[in-house]
Amino acid sequence: SPSQMSTEEVPMLVEEEKKEDVRGRNKSGRWWKETRTAKTSAIKRDKPLKTSWQKKMDEKAKKLNVKKLQTQIRDTIASAKAEKIERRKEQERRRLENERKSEIVQVISKTQKLKKTKKKDLRRIEKRDINPTSTA
């Protein structure tokens, strides 16, 4: 009966029945975010593990070596690429030079002949300077 229960037991029963207060949706709408229980400044954090000065210097030296190696590799790749491009240009220049040497040149003194020729033949004709002046 209720008269036999002590006053101390009654509040405990009420506390057990009491559930967490119902909260609505967050103002931001981000339902996955937990509600803050304590201020950020009040939360105690562990101090980060400290590394020795020697270890720091070793890491720094390693990083520096890696960077040097990276720049060296980049430079070698870039120089190889530039060399390849230069070789290709030289090859193209020599090819054009050889093409010019092997051309069959025929001087057309009468320009009226050109007007009479067919379009197909005109496509094969190219203008050339027979006596190129040296530009050195």
Image (spheres, rainbow, N blue to C red):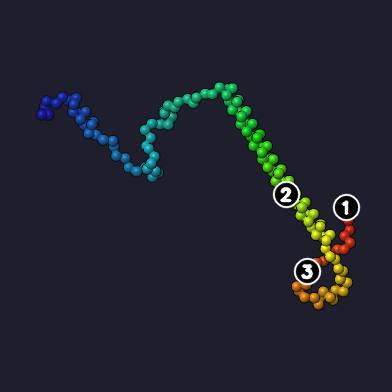
Pinpoint residue 97: horizontal percent, then vertical percent. Answer: 81, 57
Residue identified by numbered label 2: 85
Which type of secondary structure does the marked residue at label 1 adopt?
Answer: loop
| Real-space CA distance between mark 2 and mark 3, rounded to the nearest whole angstrom | 31 Å
Pinpoint residue 3: horizontal percent, then vertical percent. Answer: 11, 27
Is the N terminus in the top left, top right, bottom left or bottom right quadrant?
A: top left
Of label 3 and label 1, which has the lower sequence position? 3
Residue identified by numbered label 1: 136
Residue appearing at x 74%, y 51% in the figure: 88
Q: Amino acid at mark 1?
A: Ala
Q: Are marks 3 and 1 in contact (CB under 8 Å)?
A: no
- The image quarter containing residue 78 is top right
Of label 2 and label 1, which has the lower sequence position? 2
Closer to viewer: mark 3 or mark 1 = 3
Q: Amino acid at mark 3?
A: Arg
Observer-nearest of 99 and 56: 99
Q: Is residue 8 above or below residue 75?
A: above
| Real-space CA distance between mark 3 and mark 1, rounded to the nearest whole angstrom | 31 Å
Q: Is residue 84 above or below residue 1?
A: below
Q: What numbered label is drawn on residue 113?
A: none
